[in-house]
Image (tube, rainbow, N blue to C red):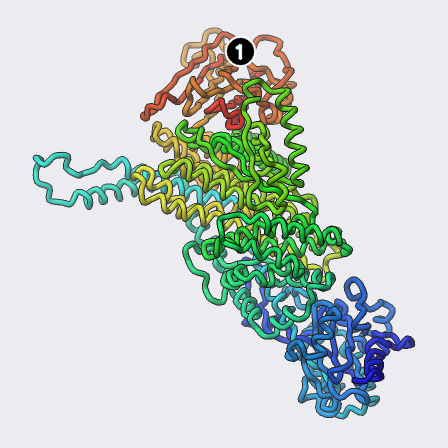
Amino acid sequence: MTISQRIAIAVAEAGLPSDQCMACERQGLPILPLRRALVPDTRPQGLTTVAGNLHVSAKLGVRTLRMGYLYVLLDQQVWHAYEVSEQGHLRRFNPYEPSEGLPASLPEKCVNENHDIPSSFLNIDTDRYGSAWLAFSSDPWPVGVLDAYKKGQAPAHRFEGVDLTQARHNPELLGIAMTPDNLQVDKEVLEYAQYGCSPFDSAHGFHTRWLRRFALKGYLVNAMNRHTLEKGVLAVVLDDTVGLIQEFNHQRLSWVVKRQVWREDPMRAYQLQTSQILQVIRATHREWAAQKVPSLEPMTGDGPPVFTDPTVERQRLVERAQLESDERLEERYDEAKRATFQAGYDQQEIEFQGYIDKNARAYVALFDTPMFKVAEQYDYDGDHRESGVAYAKTMALCLGGGITETVAPDAAPAAGTSETLWLKWLKDPDSPPYRALLMRDRALLAGLLPSFSATDVINWNDSDKFYGMLSKVIGSDDAGLRMRNTLKQAIAETQGALNAASQRLAPSLPPGIQNAVRHLNSATQYLYNGVHLIELEVKMKLGEYYALQSAHLRELQHKANASIAEARDRMHRNIDDFDLHSTKAWNKVRPIMQHGLMSLAVLDPRFTHTMISVTVWVEGTAEEVRGRLLEEANMKVTQASSMAQRTLVDISVAAGTLEANARNVLKDLRITSQQASQLVRTGFSGLRGVASSWEVLLAIGGLYLQHDSLSRNQNKAEAEIGSKAHEAKLALQGSLLGILGGQIELIGLVMRSSTSNINRPWARGAAVTGKAIIKIGAVLSAVAGIFDTVQAILARKRTLFTGDTTAASHYKYAALASGVGTVAFVYAVFRPFVFGPLGVAITLSLVAYELSKRAESKESTALERWARRCYFGFANETPSIHWNAPEFSDIAFADLNAATLGVQAKLHFESSLATDPTLPKVGGLVSLNTVQQLKFLVTLPRFSKAKSAYRWKLIAHRFGDGTFPDFVGGETIASGDYLAHATKSLSPSSSFSKFSPPRHPDYARDFPIDENQRPYAVEDGSAQLEISGVVPLVPMIGNHSLLAATLLIMYWPDRNLPDAYIEVCSREMNE
């Protein structure tokens, strides 16, 4: 090619006419570009109702262009390029100098002057060019991409070829031939055929041209006359496989969101939890019934002949006993109502999953098409930073959500599923997810590659190289990566999908993959948030570790209880038609608040002092971490006792750390045990928390790293305590799920803030709504995927327990394995009613019935009482107590927890007449004084004088002390303390500096307090401690001055673990 030819091509490409508007005054043959896309199927068979809402199916069709870029290669030599606005209008630009930001919409003035019609067409000078090659792209092409396509170095099938001579004379052979008399697009193109598309929701929005059909006819008349087009104007349909993938992804994730909204109904979520807990209680009773049936095997060989098989006969007796157990329980709740609800819920879940899977199959198939492969491979240049950023954002819309099929443990991924697709991607270091997270940067991808090695030996040199490359990118960052919130959001969606997929597919992946994902999480936090992460290992006693978990769960429970109580108060204030009796019944059901330990199994002396290695993630460079730890250590040493000074533990840098220098900086550093505890405690809270939607990247990364370290700590603990400590393992699993649940609910706050924006006026455009749904659905699917995977792994572990356990404990694991999908709703309820950590841990503690060895009849009664009062219960006691609304969930859980754990705080006012009404009355009426007494009972399981501690107090409330249950004053009338720690109570209104004294004494001060210890069948030195008393109240005419009472308990089963305590606060009104 001569120099003059090159100059002519450069002028043709870049020399845009300065006297013309590049949107509506372009000259040349007009061609209307369209795209293949999903459109609503408005036929009768396409309309259905799902969960009470109208749903319209989708089918392949034709639409106007979405926001993006249209490239036209004329005679394979000259580029013309067009920005495509959100509404599908084209503005020509210099292909080598794309403007910054998204394509702008056509000014309103131009739209009012009908310029929107010509701006929908591209224009080509057919006197100069004979052929045109058209391609639509989501993002602008950098110079390297333009040159590769022009020179034939990239596949030509990326383009749609148009013979311009045929376009003039036989447009029907190339696409749609539009004439004023027969537009055709008004039947075949969604925007021209329909005014609206609701309830169909598109990822790319919808901008109707239905009202512009008449104006289009006028434009066609002029165009056909000007260019002598006898057969009409060409409309050409272009490939948009990337857009189709985004659309199918949007459809499947919109079903995830719809399912989420359906699950989030507070009443439905509460009914689900109650139903599943009842199933566990039912299985518990069946197992107890089986245990009571004695063995029929002969003990000696000199008995009478036996004509029936003892095993068969015992099985018959067991089945009869279990049937009687079911019948007894069903006297207390409506099993038919519960079963009907559960069946309906399960059926609706199956229907939702069916729609998700249907869209997922179509979505997965498109990734294997030649058009996606060529666009993904050749449309972007990793050496061009803006192109890499654009790739990351576009891929987020394609990859967000990750795997959406139901978790099926021990089953190989099925062909054509998102599970199989992610399995292939995770094994390939050059696959789209890895490339998107590192913006196709070749140096960074090469730096990550050694992390895929499956060797056990850590190659710190490789980590240091990767860390150095990241530092270099950040140091020379002129793109302001940390300031780009849209990029962070995109990275968060892709990172979340990859994290969840790697956890779910871990059994099918080579060992090195998890190491690579761990490094990738550290890398993205450093690259996009500027957060340095270091993974540390510290030694700690198992009991201390569980105590810290309990302390974290205690805080989560406290917040949950407070929010539910607030909701209950709002509900109470909104009831207009309540009477005195309903108010009394209401108050009766509000007594108990419980915080703390979910199981005492881990505090067994056999396990509590076992040393384990605990992995934690800390923020900061190695120098910053060292400085903090040394400063804190010096403060601790000066303040602590000599014993505490000697309690120092080693820390070491673990494999997830990228900063290789961290090993040398933190070498030989020892910290106090208090510091080790603080590191672990901080690790439970994730990374910094979540303050705004873009910071979801921090939360997503924090959730993965937190889950990763918790899971490894869990495995280490289980390996240390051995194969027989099943209750302890279940307790640790319960706290793991609870902590993850709390972190997921934190992310749920971001979800709520995002969903609330959808209905705002500025967000009502379909495009904004579509993108918001993808973001919400992507994050939702990612966090749910991690939680589902954890549950499946733990359930699989529990099923393995059954092979070597006794009949007594067999039930615990079998029932949990079959029913612990029972707590899958934890992540599903991002509501003010925080069911999560509370519900998970209690459900697990119910199954891990560590205290079932004490009086079974008493335990059984407690569970039967709970069944009677729950949502499905008959509530046929006097007075009636019925937890028939989600606002009572905290009370229901506390009552259930009291039954399972065994710590109880009971209060009861009893009344009787001072005079016997059966005696003859002399002199007419006598004063009918009421004699009252306040009974209380404190029950502490596994109490040992040698190691346990407790504190309890009984507080009286009178007029002036506030209103039930939020008292501001009270008099402590009885209390007890046994070597208790000076820990402040979490329960509100439990400690008062003042009270309203009565005019006259209203209770007898010299009442006895009884303490009784009941040893357990297994002699381990512990007993069930019962503290009880009866407080006589002074008889009064009318209402008594003592209005209510509070009983507070704080109990440390092992006082050497200050954080391992349970707190129960019970209140009762004097009515």
Q: Nearer the viewer, residue 440 or 301?
A: 440
Q: Position of residue 889 (x, y in %)?
A: 53, 38
Q: Nearer the viewer, residue 77 or 846?
A: 77
The relative height of residue 918 versus residue 282 in the rendered view (above or below) is above
Can residue 572 be spotted in the picture?
Answer: no
Q: Where is residue 798, by image quadrant?
A: top left
Residue at 65% x, 15% y: name it: 994
The relative height of residue 95 versus residue 609 in the rendered view (above or below) is below
Q: Position of residue 257 (x, y in %)?
A: 59, 56
Q: Nearer the viewer, residue 84 or 276?
A: 84
Q: Position of residue 331 (x, y in %)?
A: 37, 39
* Residue hosting label 1: 1003
Q: Is residue 1022 left or right of residue 115?
A: left
Density class for disc 1 (Cα within 10 Å; few <14, some 14-19, many ≥20) is many
Label tally: 1
Q: Is residue 257 left or right of residue 133?
A: left
Q: Nearer the viewer, residue 437 or 741?
A: 437
Residue at 83% x, 82% y: name it: 3
The relative height of residue 941 versus residue 996 in the rendered view (above or below) is below
The relative height of residue 800 versus residue 148 in the rendered view (above or below) is above
Q: Position of residue 821 (x, y in %)?
A: 45, 48
- For the view shown, which residue lies furthest in the right direction? 19
Q: Is residue 174 left or right of residue 610?
A: right
Element assignment for label 1: loop
The N terminus appears in which quarter of the rendering? bottom right
What residue type is disc 1 on? Answer: Tyr
Q: Where is residue 120, by image quadrant?
A: bottom right
Can residue 653 be spotted in the picture?
Answer: yes
